[in-house]
Each structure stands twice: as C-alpha cells, then as structure tokens.
Amino acid sequence: MISQAFKFIYLHIPKTGGTSIWKSLELIVPDLTYVGHGTDKWLPYKNSHFVFTSIRNPWDLTVSNYFYLRKDKTFWNSSDGSTQYGPRPDHSLVKNLSFNEFVHALAEGRITDKHVTTSQHKWVNKFNIDYFIRFENFTSDLRAVCKKISLPSPSILKLNSTDHAPYQEYYTPELVELVGEFYKRDIELFSYEFKR
C-alpha cells in the first residue's frame, strides 16, 4: 500500500494485522493505493518513502494461520466462491486436521499456500524497513507510525482476524521445536521467542 501525499509504503505480510492497517488508514488517507501482498510495484519509491510493515511472533502466527485456513469464509476467501478470491489454498486439507497434524503438515511441506509458508522476512527483503509494527504492540506501534508520517491516530479496525486461545495453549514441546525450525530466520531476525 502506498500514499504519495504522505510519502509512505506499507508492506503487507499475511496475518500480521495488515487488513486492519489498510482499512484503518483508508479512512484518513485519501490517496491510499492497496495491491495486496505484492511489493515489487513499490520498489521505485523505496528510497523516497517511509517504509513500514507489521510482523508477528511465528508461533502465534502459526496458530492464526491454522484457524484462518479452517474458516469457510474470511474477509478475502470463501469455500463457496462468494468473496473476491474464492477458496483458500489448503482449506480442504486443513479443515480436517488437528493443530498437531497441521504443524506436521507444514514442516513436511504438505501446506502449499505461500501466504502461510513464506517467511515474514522474505515478503520485505527488497526494502530497508524504517519501522516494524509488532503485532504484540499493534495499537501503540501503529500510532507511533502515524506520528512519524504526520497522520492523526486512526480509529483502529479489527478485521480478518481469528478467534482462538493464547497461542501457547496449542503447543507441545515437539510443536514448539518444529515451528521454531520452520521459521528459524524470522525468529533470529526479529528476536522472537516462545513465551511460556
């Protein structure tokens, strides 16, 4: 997403609050242009605009992805084709899996949806990021970004979310290790840990 008037780029990493950021900023930024998760279109502006993104603890992200893929209808996708993008890849597989089975399928390469399997750093690796909104500090970090780019604090909408217990409740020690290995580079780059 880009605004030429306010000279910023937001790079939307899946399931890190990006739909909420887009729709919240759309209310106060008249020239906002959104193209989904694609980022190459904004490369010509990477040195002239403030660039920010949002990131999420990989263990929490995995729980969110699991519940998201199981949904018959989301903001973007639906099993009946009634939304913009139709059925989500892997929906028919994941809707019948336990969380344990899902993590094993992810680790074994049986999950093919790039929105789930692509590490967070790979969505933004062509850019120098000026600010990382941490999902864990979503509201305060988004307000800090708005201050930096001279925007008023928006009303923050909560969209495209999943309902589930705290992520720690879904993990066994084996699953912690499997997800830790799968998203190892994100964990290192963004200093994440499994919080007990």
Image (spheres, grey):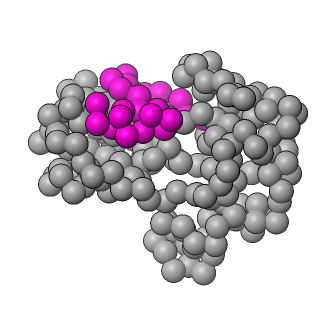
Identify the residue at horizontal 29%, vertical 36% (top origin).
143
Identify the residue at horizontal 64%, vertical 67% (top origin).
71
Asked if residue 36 is among those painted magenta in the image, a careful observer would answer no
The quarter of the picture where the C terminus appears is: top right
Q: Is residue 158 visible?
A: yes
Task: Please determine whether, in this image, residue 102 is positioned above or below residue 83.
Answer: above
Identify the residue at horizontal 48%, vertical 38% (top origin).
135
Q: Which residues are magenta?
A: 119-144
Toward the viewer: 168 or 53?
A: 168
Identify the residue at horizontal 56%, vertical 79% (top origin).
81
Rendering coords of residue 16 (x, y %): 50, 43
Rendering coords of residue 151 (x, y %): 17, 39
Rendering coords of residue 95 (x, y %): 76, 65
Residue 26 relative to residue 86: left or right: left
How many badges with numbers are in the image? Answer: 0
Q: Quadrant of residue 42?
A: top left
Residue 124 relative to residue 59: left or right: left
Task: Please determine whether, in this image, residue 189 is positioned above or below residue 91.
Answer: above
Rendering coords of residue 121 (x, y %): 53, 29
Asked if residue 120 is among those painted magenta in the image, a careful observer would answer yes
Toward the viewer: 114 or 151?
A: 151
